[in-house]
Image: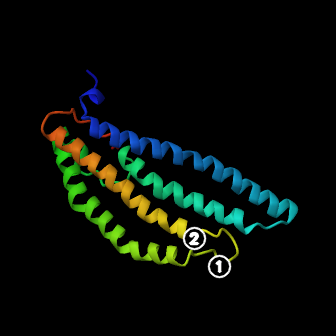
Amino acid sequence: MTPSAREPALLRSLDAFTDRIGRSVAWLVIIMMAVQFAIVVMRYVFNIHNTVMQESVMYMHAAVFMLGAAWTLRRDGHVRVDIFYRRLSARGRAWIDLCGTLFLLIPVVLFIGIGSYGYVRSSWAIMERSPDGGIPGVFLLKSLILIMMVLLLVQGIAQLIRQVLVIRHRLPGKSPDHEELV
């Protein structure tokens, strides 16, 4: 029986959701690079400036980072200070991850989500547009804040489930992927 077969259906579906979003958003990097290349060629070869194209790169950049944050969390790709963590047992790492999720991730996500709700709502109320005549959807860009919070909360719940299962010996813990050589 593989480790994923032992995972509860809820955990598998939350992880699969995060994976689908992350893989989809990753394609924006290629599109963003192509658009940026076109902007450079247009500007320096043809002396043409396009505000909408430039803003589209900013929108895609924001989408990659904000919508990809939960996928990065899922893949354990966020920065961490690894002084003691890697030397701990799987259960010890699970306890640290559980406490970090409960006392840092979830409260910060809720704080940012609640704090930015009015900001996003007021942008929607006026259907905020670009002041430079670019993309007429600043309200959509600002909405990424709330979407990121929901995605991080979903992945945070998946992390909680996973860590509890590791602590209760229902799932094997994985060893840290990031090893420093000293």
Circles 2 and 1: CB atoms closer than 8 Å: no
**Which circle marks residue 138 in the picture?**
2
x then y, percent, for residue 108: 30, 65
Horizontal relation, residue 10 to residue 61: left or right: left
Which quadrant of the figure has residue 41? bottom right
Q: How is the image coloured?
A: rainbow
**Farthest residue, direction left:** 168
Residue 122 at x, y = what percent? Answer: 47, 78
Query: Could you give the CA–CA distance between mark 2 and mark 1, rounded to whole angstroms?
Result: 9 Å
Note whether residue 89 is visible: no
Disc 1 crowd, CA 10 A, few/some/many (<14, 14-19, 20+): few
Extreme-top residue of the structure: 1
Hey, what amino acid is under mark 1?
A: Pro
Give residue 147's position: percent from left, percent from top: 43, 59
Q: Secondary structure at mark 2?
A: helix
130 left or right, relative to 111:
right
| Furthest-front residue in this view | 125
The location of residue 121, given as percent across then percent down, is 45, 74
Please give the name of the residue rendered at 18% of the width and 39% of the height, measured from the top-left corner.
165
Q: Residue at x 66, y 51 (%)?
A: 33
**Which residue is the site of mark 1?**
131
Q: Which residue is at a point 57% across and 70% down the rendered structure image? A: 138
Q: Is residue 150 visible?
A: yes
Check disc 2: other Cα within 10 Å, few if <14, some if 14-19, many if 20+: some
Q: Is residue 138 above or below residue 97?
A: below
